[in-house]
Image: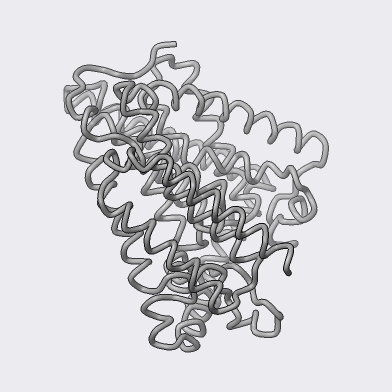
Amino acid sequence: MAKEYNIIIVFAVLLLFYFVRNFKYIKYLDKYYFFYFIYLFLLLIKGFYNANFKSYLFYDLVCFSTFFICLIVFRKKCSSVNNSFFLDIYPRAAYIVTIISLLFLLVFISMHGFTMASMEYGRGLDDLKTKLMSPKYFIGSSLFLYPLKSYIKDKIKRLVFDAAIVGYIFFSLAMSSRSTIIIGIMVMIATNINLSYKNINLSLMWNYRFISFILIVIFTILFLYQIPTIASATDYLILRFNEDESFGQTRTEEANDILDGLALSEFLFGKGLGGSNTYWIFESLPNGVNSAHYGWMFLILKGGIFFAVFIYGIIISKIISFSRNKNLIPYAITLFAFLALEYSHTNFNSFYNLSFMCIALAAFTDNVQSLDGDKRITY
């Protein structure tokens, strides 16, 4: 414990040094981000005061600091390059990451096979249990990177993004994951609607393209349903939606147990960084778990209702702001995907997912609003 404690102290000092050294870049941030830094520092102190499990405290510090550090780093780097990072560099990087994700998926299937969910055997999770390099994490990036397809003009390269999001949806079907299938389809449809709307001015032509897209999706689903393994996985997915313990029931039970166990001060201000879930089915674990199914419940556990409202308020305000700017709608879709995914599983204890959200949240709005014409990259 003493060793972990020293590591946390060193990390906290380095983090504080970084903020002090880059304090002059605070002017590029909205004021509420500075308030977030102060609040996070108080949650760190509260975590130590409550003697929260040090491993959880350290992990929370890293994840929640990511939320702030990304804002400073990307605002700092992009303040002098006229937003080329968000409109050019990042979409290029997203294309490369998407290719790597697809390669990992193909290599994994070729080496380990793939178990589809089915009516006979339930969810197809056995492939993931002890696989450190599971494609689950890599292909998951497509949910947040797919909207960046809108910045790419080359139609062949767009197909790489299409293949990745289809792979993500297929992977979700194999796992019988209800929320990720729905969100994946919503992101796919929203991105293509935005792309069609940007490129087609005639409403009649736009409606024709949109209707054609929907029909293609419907006929593709009907065709795939004729494959027995796909049909069985789909039937099991439908069963999971309709079974007695339907979507959200057990999650709500967990949230109610957590809320019942919190004192008023903890409900308002949380348990601090490292605060653990020692309720519901986790009450017998010595240190509980550093997780909660509902994202809002996880935030309340750490920083209270004020923390949850504050963070979700930032994300929602940016979604609204980006939606009003045609050049930033893809980032609005990315933030929506992150927020929607929070309903089934929190993302604030996933450093991987959190990074994509933070980059999207840091997108500049000041200069981008003055950009004219089609700014999609043409490589």
Is residue 324 found left or right of 24 in the rendered image? left
Residue placed most toward the observer, 315 or 9: 9
Q: Residue furthest right?
A: 111
Q: Is residue 279 above or below residue 147?
A: below
**Image point 51% across, 69% down: which residue?**
242
**Image point 26% across, 29% down: which residue?**
327
Quarter of the figure with residue 91: top left
| Total labels drawn | 0
Q: Quadrant of the C terminus?
A: top left
Image color mode: one colour
Q: Is residue 173 above or below residue 159?
A: below
Q: Is residue 347 above or below residue 281?
A: above
Q: Position of residue 276 (x, y in %)?
A: 58, 74
Q: Residue furthest top?
A: 379
**Image point 29% across, 27% down: which residue?**
196
**Image point 59% across, 83% down: which residue?**
280
Q: Position of residue 215 (x, y in %)?
A: 39, 35
Q: Position of residue 105 (x, y in %)?
A: 68, 36
Is residue 202 found left or right of 95 in the rendered image? left
